[in-house]
């Protein structure tokens, strides 16, 4: 059963990361469109659907499967790597929250951030994902 739970966790993480990598890219293009334009309205729909249809459910599934594995005793907390992974996951969750806020700002036509900000923000989930993968696979601590 544990291997099935782990597979569910990995699948959910892949879906979550796909959305987390794509949503800021949509913001990059949305930031330079005219408010109220047909293109801006299309971006709003795309952002909302990506967040509510993929990113949020995938994050929830990631946490459910991950906590399930922990509950089954699949993690040795005396080692350092689970704590490192947990720190990166907290960072990724905070980034998720930021993306929710930006989605709401674009939906309300109140975004004040420039395109460059979103280009930089687009790299944050990647860096956090790299940290998570290294913590789990390499287990440096």
Image (cartoon, grey):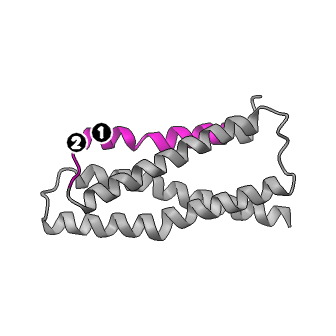
- Residue beneath label 1, please? 117
The reply to whether residue 138 is visible in this rendering is no
Image coordinates of residue 7 in percent, x first then y, are 73, 62
Q: Quadrant of residue 64?
A: bottom right
Dots 2 and 1: beta carbons under 8 Å? yes
Residue at 47% x, 46% y: name it. 95
The residue lying at 46 percent from left, 51 percent from top is 97
Q: Is residue 3 magenta?
A: no
Q: Quadrant of residue 139?
A: top right
Return the mark for residue 114: 2
What is the C-alpha distance between the residues marked 2 and 1? 6 Å
Residue found 54% across the figure and 48% down from its top: 93
Q: Is residue 32 left or right of 87 when viewed as pictured? A: left
Quadrant that contains the C terminus:
top right
Report x, y in % for residue 134: 67, 37
Q: Locate the N terminus by quadrant.
A: bottom right
Up-down relation of residue 59 to residue 79 (above or below): below
Numbered disc 2: secondary structure: loop
Identify whether 132 is placed above or below 13. above
Numbered range of the magenta stretch: 110-134
Please tell me which residue is depicted at 28% across the width and 55% down the height of the picture: 105
- For the view shown, which residue lies furthest in the top direction? 141
Q: Which mark is residue 90?
A: none
Residue 111 is covered by the magenta coloring: yes
- Can residue 47 be seen? yes
Residue 85 in the image: state x and y as whole percent: 68, 40
Q: Main secondary structure of the magenta part?
A: helix
């Amino acid at each position: 059963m544990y291997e099935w739970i782990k597979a569910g966790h990995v699948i959910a993480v892949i879906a979550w990361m796909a959305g987390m990598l794509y949503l800021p890219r949509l913001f990059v293009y949305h930031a330079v469109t005219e408010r109220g334009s047909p293109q801006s309205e299309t971006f709003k729909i795309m952002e909302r659907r990506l967040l509510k249809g993929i990113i949020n459910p995938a994050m929830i599934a990631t946490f459910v499967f991950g906590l399930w594995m922990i509950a089954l005793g699949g993690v040795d907390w005396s080692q350092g790597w689970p704590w490192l992974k947990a720190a990166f996951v907290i960072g990724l969750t905070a980034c998720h929250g930021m993306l929710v806020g930006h989605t709401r700002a674009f939906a309300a036509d109140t975004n004040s951030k420039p395109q460059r900000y979103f280009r930089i923000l687009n790299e944050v989930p990647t860096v956090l994902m790299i940290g998570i993968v290294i913590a789990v696979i390499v287990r440096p601590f």
